Image (cartoon, rainbow, N blue to C red):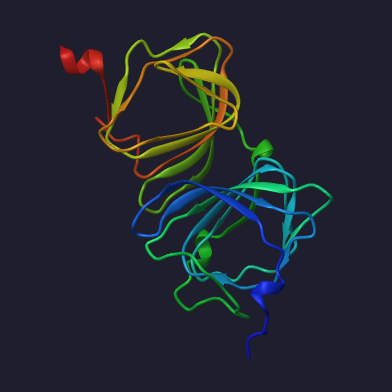
Amino acid sequence: MANQWNPDQVLPGRRRLLTWHDCGASTSRVILPPKFAAPSGIFTAELEIFILAGKIQIGEWQLGQHAYSFIPAGVKVESWQVLGEEEAEILWMENGPVPLQYQDAETNHPDARISEFIPALDSKLLPWVNIEAGIKKKFLRQHNNGGQTWLFVILPHYDTQYGMIYSYNEEAYALGGYCDLGNYPFAKDHFCYCPSYNTLPREITVDGLFGFARVDRDVSQTAVMSSYAHIND
């Protein structure tokens, strides 16, 4: 028999919705207060979390600043709590296709993709990979549909020269530094979402940018992005 718990006894957090989709997928900035605690259970949809500030514990796993976790639907997670006297600030990414709910459970759901579960990943321990001149990435997860989640650094004095058209959906959250996207100064705690086949303006930075990003398909495939210069040739 599952343990009985009352959601009204859990301290409420705060949520700012950043993007959402009719299928139930969304990205939010969630703030959990000190002394927040919730019992073990399962989520009804995939959930990615990235810690912006503070520290939380899920079962035996601790996640501090810039730690990452991926919880497939139906995988049982142990009790949650915020550690210390500071709020925990989290990028909270629900991947649908049904609205996410947290349900009391003592075991994994029979269809849970347990092999994909990432309980706690300390990004500080991951290596930087050179992607192109001026950009480095730390890969956090390869999605089962070819998409990816990563951290990135754009080095100082980077300039794409042209705007770009992507054939995939991309969202990014600035963790430090800045980069001008056309006339918009994309800086710390700013969020950017570029839908498929829309234009991402020219990117220019003097001081550099550090950020978090997700894409929904394999960006290594041929012709997934094109510059204005190439299109106008």
Quarter of the image with the C terminus is top left
Q: Residue at x 67, y 61 (%)?
A: 12
Looking at the image, is 162 positioned above or below residue 190? above
Q: Is residue 30 left or right of residue 87?
A: left
Quarter of the image with the N terminus is bottom right
Q: Residue at x 51, y 38 (%)?
A: 150
Q: Is residue 45 left or right of residue 220?
A: right
How far across and how far down the image is residue 59, in percent?
72, 65
Looking at the image, is 53 positioned above or below residue 70? above
**Is 62 or 188 nearer to us in this picture?**
188
Residue projecting furthest to the left? 233
Residue projecting furthest to the bottom? 1
**Is 231 or 18 nearer to us in this picture?**
18
How far across and how far down the image is residue 193, in percent?
41, 36
**Is 90 or 229 nearer to us in this picture?**
90
How many numbered marks does the figure carry? Answer: 0
- Please tell me in which quadrant of the rendered image residue 177 appears: top right
How far across and how far down the image is residue 189, in percent?
59, 32
- Please tell me in which quadrant of the rendered image residue 82 appears: bottom right
Q: Residue at x 35, y 36 (%)?
A: 219
Q: Residue at x 48, y 35 (%)?
A: 172
Looking at the image, is 95 positioned above or below residue 174? below
Q: Is residue 190 left or right of residue 60?
A: left
How far across and how far down the image is residue 179, in percent?
50, 18
